[in-house]
Structures are given as structure tokens and as C-alpha cells.
Image (tube, rainbow, N blue to C red):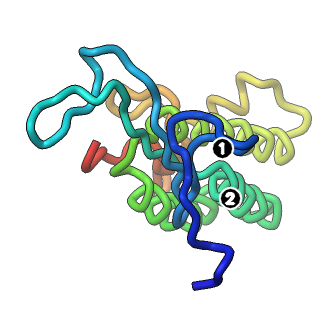
Amino acid sequence: MKPENPRIFQSLEEHEREKPGFNFIGFSIRQYRVGKHDSGETSKGKKLGFKTIIKPDQEKLQAHYRTLDEYVEENNSSSQAALISFLNPIIRGWSNYQSPWNSKETLNKLDHLLWRRLYRWGKRRHPNQGKKWVVRKYWRTIGNNNWVFASSRKEQNSYNLLLHSSFPAGLR
């Protein structure tokens, strides 16, 4: 380890102008003050007055979105099925790594950003069509979900884009 790396962090309050918490292998770890009903407990059942929350690191989140965005940009002329078949393994891998932690809000935000990016992809392919036409062409209703980016039902190998937030939480 580098001599400057091992440090003691304050994870509950700001200390010497440093934000509370720390980042470690793609996660942001921080403690938040909470009331007695939401508080963590010691092994003996004593209330701590705070809760530790682990979220995906903002820098890693932005890097992941940039990866998805760059691929969509590079493949403006690819078919919807080809685009989905490439994006799904990236989404599956990143979501499986992040899903055990408290990341529902972050993953929903990422899904929204990706939806907006894919909508721009569809509008670019059909500049003379309206918004509703583009949405009806590329998004389907599957089960209870009305906004699934999925290839045409007519194709033999129909593909659905996975959502970041659809992965189950493991250790929350």
C-alpha cells in the first residue's frame, strides 16, 4: 500500500473539510443519523443512532453510463436487436455487481438516463416521425411493464433490454 492511502475516515460527519464517508472498489460508504426505529444495532442489541449505507460510487456510475452511451453512439445504424444483444451483458454484469447494496434509487436513475439515450437513438433513425410513433415502434408492453425496449414481435429472435433496477437485491 502507498503511505498516503491508509487513512482514518469520518463516515458520519464532515471533518477537516472532508466530506463524510469514503469510496472503496466502486462503492460509496457513508453513515447517516437516523431515529431509534431505523437505527443499526450492536451485536448485543444496543441502538447506534446511525445507519451505514453503501451506494454505487458516482464516478463509477458515470463511467458505466458513458460506456453505454458510447456504444449506442457508435452503433446508430445497428438494428434494435443487435443493440440490445450488446447492451444486455454490460447491464447484467454491472447490475449484479451493484445490486446487493442500497442502490435502487441509483439504478432507477440510470434506467431513466438510458431510456432517454435510446429515445434519442430512435429519433435519430426516424427524424420525420413523431414522438409517439418512435415510442410505439421501439417500446413494448411485456407483462405489467409498459416501457420495455424490445425488438419487434415479428422477428424470430425477439430481444428485450434488461433494466438495471430489475436485478434482485441480495444483501440489503
Question: Looking at the image, which residue is at 25% across and 48% down?
Answer: 171
**Res 153 visible:** no
| 157 shown above or below 161 | below
Camera-side residue: 122 or 67? 67
* Secondary structure of residue under mark 1: helix
Upstream in sequence: badge 1 or badge 2: 2
**Res 43 visible:** yes
* Crowdedness near tag 2: few (<14), some (14–19) or many (≥20) residues, C-alpha within 10 Å: some
* Secondary structure of residue under mark 2: helix
The quarter of the rendered structure image containing the C terminus is top left
| 113 shown above or below 162 | above
Q: Residue furthest bottom?
A: 1
Q: What residue is pinned by disc 2?
A: 68
Residue 49's x, y, as percent?
33, 24
Amino acid type of disc 1? Answer: Leu
The mark found on residue 167 in the picture is: none
Question: Looking at the image, which residue is at 57% across and 71% down?
Answer: 6
Side of 65 where 98 appears, left or right:
left
Side of 17 where 2 appears, left or right:
left
Question: Looking at the image, which residue is at 46% across and 50% down?
Answer: 162
The mark found on residue 114 in the picture is: 1
Side of 118 where 81 appears, left or right:
left
Cβ atoms at labels 1 and 2 below 8 Å apart: yes
Residue 168's x, y, as percent?
30, 45
Q: Residue furthest front?
A: 16
Camera-side residue: 115 or 27? 27
Q: Residue furthest left?
A: 44
The quarter of the rendered structure image containing the N terminus is bottom right
* Measured Cα–Cα span from mark 1 to mark 2: 8 Å
Question: Looking at the image, which residue is at 24% across and 15% down?
Answer: 37
Residue 119's x, y, as percent?
73, 38
Q: Residue furthest right?
A: 128
